[in-house]
Image: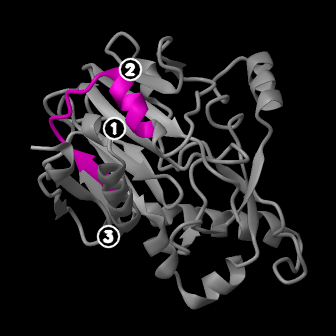
Amino acid sequence: MSASLVTRPAIRVEPLTCALGAEIKGISLADASRSDDLFAQIKALLLKHKVLFLRDQDISRAEHVAFARRFGELEDHPVAGSDPEHPGLVRIYKSPEAPNDRYENSWHTDATWREKPPMGAVLRCIECPAVGGDTMWANMALAYENLPAHIKTQIAGLRARHSIEATFGAAMPIENRLALKALYPDAEHPVVRTHPETGEKVLFVNGFTTHFTNFHTPANVRVGQDYTQGMSTLLQYLISQAMIPEYQVRWRWSPHSVAIWDNRCTQHYAVMDYAPCHRKMERAGIMGDATY
């Protein structure tokens, strides 16, 4: 039979919650790294469901990178270590020997401290505990959609700063922290981002966000206390929207399982309830565009 007559089995799609997330079955990401048609189907599903999950993906690091690169160029992380033979494949390894290496997690969108935050990521489980170590995602387009009308009006033109210095750098010696900030100055993004492919409005503040940059105006500030208390109260309210269960999906890992997510419209949280166990994950982060 000629290659042109070969038909692939249809992708099976099982939505996991009403908010976001679907498990896809019947395919290999190794095949998708080589097939335009299969990749196009996966990308369309990603835009629809915002995060996709697959099991039994016993693929090589090279295949992992090749599939992720289909979305765009990959980026290294300045703090987490990368695989030396596969630049852009970041190793997120947690072990019982480093119990303090678990403190940093919060609800977040990856690397919003960059001027151009990542478009998305492909995360593969290498080793995980039998129980615990799940990851959760939240739909921040739905979070924006459900905000009260007066809050949408108030935040329509607001912008905010996002910092690697105040997050990854916080536990570093001061000279290291300042050097990190010099390499990655705080980025500024709109509080409400427009998704470049779907056109959705997205609530775009998270654990890397430190403050609004244009809140201190006559419309928002009457007397001194309004500046600090009014701004911080509003920011914390917006950040807390990711914690609402109706916006979330939770994934239980197993070796060779994979998550693919759209970083432009989601937040995620790696649940650190598994000490003292190993948890080894490898992530290919995909470069993104400027926010608007």
What is the CA distance from the residue labelled 2 to the residue labelled 1? 28 Å
* Marking on residue 96: none
Instruction: Provide the residue span drawn in magenta.
Output: 50-68
Above or below, 286 relative to 42: above
Whether pointer 2 and pointer 1 mark residues with C-beta atoms closer than 8 Å, the reply is no
The residue to which callout 3 is attached is 19
Residue 244 appears at what percent x and percent y? 38, 66
Residue closest to the eye, 188 or 13: 13
The residue to which callout 1 is attached is 34
Give the side of residue 63 with respect to residue 10, left or right.
right
Q: Is disc 3 placed on a helix, strand or loop?
A: loop
Could one spot residue 245 in this view of the protein? Answer: yes
Could one spot residue 50 in this view of the protein? Answer: no
**Quarter of the rendering containing residue 58:** top left
Q: Residue at x 23, y 66 (%)?
A: 17
In this view, the mark in front (2 or 1): 1
Residue 141 appears at what percent x and percent y? 48, 71
Whether pointer 2 and pointer 3 mark residues with C-beta atoms closer than 8 Å, the reply is no
Query: Of label 3 and label 1, which has the lower sequence position?
Result: 3
Picture quarter with the C terminus? bottom right
**Residue type indicated by callout 1:** Arg
The residue to which callout 2 is attached is 93
Query: Of label 2 and label 1, which has the lower sequence position?
Result: 1
> Is 7 inside the magenta-drawn segment?
no
Residue 261 appears at what percent x and percent y? 40, 51
Q: Is disc 2 placed on a helix, strand or loop?
A: strand
What is the CA distance from the residue labelled 3 to the residue labelled 1? 31 Å
